[in-house]
Amino acid sequence: MALLRPATNTIPVIFVVVNYPVGQGFIPNLAHPGGNITGFSFIEPEIVGKWINLLSDVKPDLSRVALMYNPDTAAYYDAYLRAFKALPRQSGVDVDAAPVRSAADIERAVAELARDERSGLIVAADPYTVTMREVILKSAEQHRVLLSAPYRRFALDGGLMSYGPDTADIFRRSSSYVDRILKGELPGNLPVQSPDKFELVVNLKTAKALGLSVRESFCSWLTR
């Protein structure tokens, strides 16, 4: 989007699974994006609290969480954390950033978390963390750190859980905007849509290895 936006101000553009479109400067307003761009967002600041609550549900003594992301590819998570910390405190869990730019950074961040048995790791929706999935999961397993991520692949590959928007559903919904624009509606008059379908995945094998008890009713879809 950063390269596409200045390339045209006339060709209709529909973005899909884009984080923080206003903060990144792609559009001025969610309800009335104006211009030639509209679309469907992905991760919003409010989900940070949900991630923490889910980890607390399986580990009631959770007291510290780190949000891992690469500042070069997902700088907007600084704003997400500020927004979350500005809310009235709803739990006793402290949340801090864990900026990483290399495998060594990832290892250091996870090892530091492991010093506190009441800690957990949230892996943000970030192109970098997706490409470094194997490194992150291996480090979390080695140090026995609770890990949550927005993408189900993290849970399927050994992380404790994932919770995030259903990306397939978002792409299906985006086709309606394509149809409306082709029929003559202006992109700038179509409000940016937030996700309305979310998916929770818990890896029961990992939970057992970590000594955690997870109620089956807690999950909408379980890995075994």
Image (cartoon, rainbow, N blue to C red):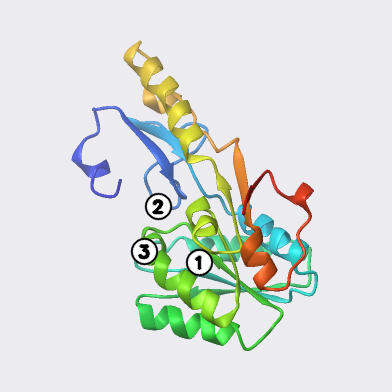
Q: Secondary structure at mark 2?
A: loop
Quadrant for the C terminus in the image: bottom right
- Image location (x, y in percent) of residue 58: 75, 64
Which residue does the image show at 52% across and 55% down from the upper left?
156
Q: 146 and 7: which one is in front?
A: 146
Quadrant for the N terminus in the image: top left
Camera-near label (1 vs 3) is: 3
Left/right placement of residue 149 relative to residue 189 reads right
- Image location (x, y in percent) of residue 92: 78, 72
Question: What residue did someone put label 2 on?
Answer: 24
Which residue does the image show at 79% across and 63% down from the upper left?
90
- Quadrant hosting residue 70: bottom left
Q: Secondary structure at mark 1?
A: helix
> CA–CA distance between discs 1 and 2?
12 Å
Question: What residue did someone put label 1 on?
Answer: 78
Which residue does the image show at 40% across and 27% down from the upper left?
188
Q: 210 and 152: which one is in front?
A: 210
Question: What residue did someone put label 3 on?
Answer: 128
> CA–CA distance between discs 1 and 3?
16 Å
Camera-near label (2 vs 3) is: 3
Is 54 rendered above or below residue 10?
A: below
Q: Amino acid at mark 1?
A: Asp
Q: Amino acid at mark 3?
A: Tyr
- Image location (x, y in percent) of residue 179: 38, 16
- Image location (x, y in percent) of residue 88: 76, 62
Q: Amino acid at mark 2?
A: Gln
- Around disc 2, counting alpha carbons within 10 Å, would you say few (fewer than 14), some (14 to 19), or many (20 or more)? some
Looking at marks 2 and 3 on the same chain, the residue that comes earlier in the sequence is marked by: 2
Left/right placement of residue 79 relative to residue 130 reads right
Q: Secondary structure at mark 3?
A: helix
